[in-house]
Image (cartoon, rainbow, N blue to C red):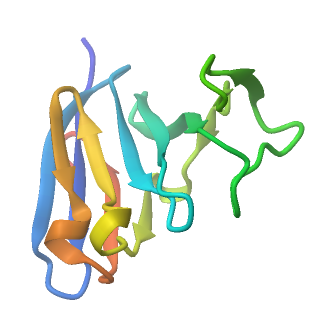
């Protein structure tokens, strides 16, 4: 039987829940945002692997400030549109959670899970938001 863990996004200072979604084992989600200088969309995609939050791949449309492929960390492949994917990252996130300060306005940090997109920026721009994969029953 596969797991059905929960992906959450919570404002640390207030405990306000921005997102709570079931994520079965093998399912994934992406964190999206617009580069603060160039404005294009960047995408980091994760997967629930046996209850662990694992960074699987990233999409970077350009080698803009702060964006680059680090040799030995995944595999860089063309996206066919001038940008690239970093595939096979397969990096477990320590503690299955991390803290993000969503950018305001056009940066618009979002989580996409299936067809659902939730703006972290609209809910908590510049606040500390904990993104976590919570164990079933945990």
Q: Nearer the viewer, residue 4 or 17?
A: 17
Residue 30, x across and y down, in percent: 38, 39
Residue 133, x across and y down, in percent: 33, 48
Residue at image x 60%, y 39%? 61
User: Up-down: is 93 above or below 136?
Assistant: below
Q: Quadrant of residue 94?
A: bottom right
Residue 20, x across and y down, in percent: 13, 49
101 relative to 129 in the view: left or right: right
For the question of whether residue 4 can be seen, the reply is: no
For the question of whether residue 131 can be seen, the reply is: yes
Q: Nearer the viewer, residue 112 or 99?
A: 112
123 relative to 45 in the view: left or right: left
Work out which residue is located at the far top of the displayed protein and give it.
1
How many dots with numbers?
0
Residue at image x 46%, y 36%? 45
Quarter of the picture containing the N terminus is top left
Q: Nearer the viewer, residue 20 or 4?
A: 20
Residue at image x 24%, y 34%? 113
């Amino acid at each position: 039987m596969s797991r059905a863990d929960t992906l959450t996004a919570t404002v640390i200072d207030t405990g306000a829940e921005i997102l709570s979604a079931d994520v079965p084992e093998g399912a994934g989600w992406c964190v999206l945002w617009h580069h603060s200088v160039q404005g294009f969309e960047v995408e980091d995609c994760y997967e629930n692997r046996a209850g662990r939050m694992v960074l699987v791949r990233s999409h970077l449309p350009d080698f803009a400030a702060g964006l680059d492929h680090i040799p030995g960390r995944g595999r860089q492949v063309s996206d066919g549109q001038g940008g690239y994917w970093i595939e096979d990252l397969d990096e477990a996130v320590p503690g299955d959670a991390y803290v993000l300060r969503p950018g305001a306005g056009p940066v618009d940090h979002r989580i996409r899970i299936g067809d659902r997109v939730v703006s972290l920026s609209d809910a908590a721009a510049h606040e500390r938001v904990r993104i976590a994969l919570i164990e079933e029953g945990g």
